[in-house]
Amino acid sequence: MQRVMNVMALGAMVLALGAGCAGKKRVARVSADTQTDLSGKWNDTDAKMTSDKLIKECFEAGWLPNFKEEEGRRPSIRVRGIVNKTDEHIDAQIFIKSIERAMVNSGKVKVLAQEGAELRSVEAEQDRGAAGALSDDSAPSIGNETGADFVVAVRMGSILDQYEGQKAKFYKINFELISPTSGEKVWIGDHEIKKLIEQDSVGW
C-alpha cells in the first residue's frame, strides 16, 4: 500500500513540474507594421518588402514611359496568379494583394480585378445593369470593361539547408510583366531573401 502511495505522490510531482514548465501564455498586441519572424517561414513582412521592392524597380524601368508616350495613358495591369514552388504552403492572395497595393499606391498604373471571385463580382454588377436593375446613369456597361495591357506572373522558389540546430532558408521570387496580345515580356525582375534560423537548446 505504501508503495502505491509513493508512486501516486511521484506522479503528482511530475504533473506539477510539467505544469510549472509550461507557464502561462502571454499575448501582446503590436502594430501591424511590426516585423515578426518566429518560424523563419515566409510571412507578411516578406510579402510586403518583396512587392514594394519589385514594383518600385518595375515602374522605374523604360517600358512604362515608352507605353505612356505611345498610348497617351496609364497602362492597365492584372495580376494573374503566383506559382508556388517552395516547400511551404503560402497564401497566394496575401502576396497578390501586397503587389496590387504597391501598384495602386504608386498612381502610375490601373489595376484590374483578378480572375475568379473578383471578376465574377464585376460581371454580376454588369449583368444587373444590363437587366435594367440599375438606373441608366449609374449602370455599368458590359462593353466598358477594361482589358489588361499587361499581366503579372510571379514564381516563388526556395532552398532549405540545415545542419544540427541551424537552418538556412533561401527564397527566390521572379516577377514578369507580359503583354497578353503579343506575349512579349516587357520587364523581368527578381528578389532574394535569405534567413538563418537557429534552434535554442532546451535547458532544465
Image: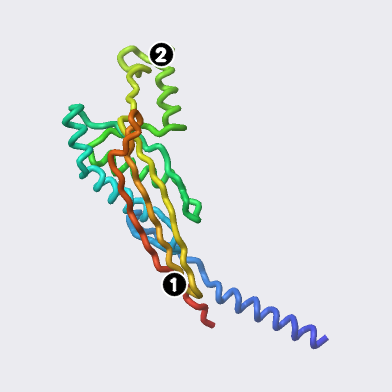
Report x, y in % for residue 3: 79, 87
| Position above or below: 4 against 184 | below
Mark 2 or 1, nearer chain start: 2
Report x, y in % for residue 25: 50, 66
Provide the residue designation for mark 2. Answer: 130
Mark carried by residue 146: none
Camera-near label (2 vs 1) is: 1
Residue at 37% across, 55% down: 46
The kind of residue tagged 1 is Glu
Residue at 34% across, 46% down: 175
Q: Quadrant of the C terminus?
A: bottom right
Tag 1, which secondary structure?
A: strand
The kind of residue tagged 2 is Ala
In the picture, measured across the screen, residue 73 lies left or right of residue 132, that is left
Query: Closest to the observer: 9 or 84?
Result: 84
Provide the residue designation for mark 1. Answer: 198
Q: Quadrant of the N terminus?
A: bottom right
In the picture, measured across the screen, residue 176 lies left or right of residue 6, that is left
